[in-house]
Amino acid sequence: MRPIPGHTKGVRAVAFAPDGKLVSAGEDRTVRIWDAASGRPLEVLKAQRVVYAVAVSPDGGTLAYAGRATDTRSRTNTIPLWDLLNGRSDGEYDWTVEQEQARAFRGAGSIWSLSFSADGLYLAAARRKLGGGNHPNGAGGRWWRRQKPFTTDAFPPRSTYAVGFAPAGATLALTQRGAVSVFDGPERPEKRGYKFPVDWAAAVTFVPDSSTVVAAANRFLYVANTDKEARLRAVRTGIPHIKSLAVSPDGRTLLVGGRPGAVELYQLPDFTLRSAFDFGLGDVDAIAFAPDGLTYAVGGASGLIICDIE
């Protein structure tokens, strides 16, 4: 375990670029780009509000980040884009919600989930808004096409919480209230829909070289092969509230992180628990594998670390 000092508050999002650079962001309103091998900081981007989500395009050229809206009363939240190759702004995507929905959620809501499609053609995002008793409500999802014709639209479920593209093509999954939906692409109709017996799932991902989707809800992983299985099967973890998922590039290991302060490693495809750790970071909000699959980054309430796979 190697601490990466720099953030002054909790780290809410981590991602690796294909060349091995590490991106982290969080409550100190910064997005930091690191040389992961040495822990040396390369760039620090100042965000206007707390950042909850980051994503790097498959070609390593574009970083997207987002979080709280600049003005909590506004109907618009913004996703800034950063050119990682040239170290400069690459524009932004604005997400303006309908007036009726903005009134219901008292503003645009915060963006908690970002994902690029494996072919680089799309960026997708999902929002949340706190409801009564600090319970998170899914506040919808949206996608942007990054090549001509430059189009954008909302996903049909208005209660979307999280979104994740598959490691190949443009297949994606999104979690909504009590369900997971799978699409062959953002502009295609729903391919499969799965119900699960809880209100919401905080994270969703795919296993490389397979059609297996994994969603995290409370202490369970909900898993299905989207080519043939009509129902999700549940895998119980030792983490009471899962907040983040990451699958190794070879598809053999699943990382699970959450509250209170736990990280578990599962062997795939049978979801056998290999090991569990408490790195002393408090709640684990973000996990990401390095491109070589030999190391992974963990972001939590007390900072950022890089760890080696056993």
Image: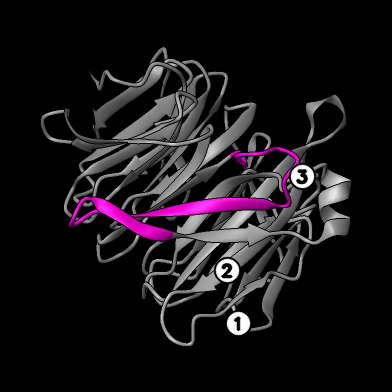
Q: Position of residue 230 (x, y in %)?
A: 70, 71
Q: Mark 2 or 3, which is nearer the eye?
A: 3
Dot 1: what SS? Answer: loop
Q: Are marks 2 and 3 in contact (CB under 8 Å)?
A: no
Magenta-colored stretch includes residue 70: yes
Task: Determine the residue positioned at 66% across, 39% down.
Answer: 71
Judge whether 274 appears above or below 157 on screen: above
Disc on the earlier residue, 3 or 1 = 3
Q: CA distance from mark 2 to mark 1?
A: 9 Å
What's the residue type where badge 1 is placed?
Glu
Closer to us: 226 or 111: 111
Q: Mark 2 = which residue?
A: 143
**CA gap, disc 3 to disc 1?**
26 Å
Amino acid, disc 3: Gly
Classify residue 181 by image quadrant.
bottom right
The kind of secondary structure element at disc 3 is loop
Residue 245 in the image, given as x and y percentages of width and height: 48, 43
**What is the quadrant of the C terminus in the image?**
top left
User: Which segment is the magenta one?
Assistant: 68-91
Residue 181 vertical position relative to residue 77 in the rendered view, above or below = below
Residue placed under numbered mark 3 in the picture: 107
- From the image, tell me which residue sits under label 1: 187
Label 2 vs 3, first from the N-terminus: 3
Q: Nearer the viewer, mark 2 or mark 1?
A: 2
What is the spatial separation of the Cα atoms under label 2 and label 3, in whole angstroms? Answer: 19 Å
In this view, the residue in front, 137 or 271, is 137
SS at mark 2 in the image: strand
Extreme-left residue of the structure: 38
Whether tag 2 and tag 1 are in contact, CB under 8 A, the answer is yes
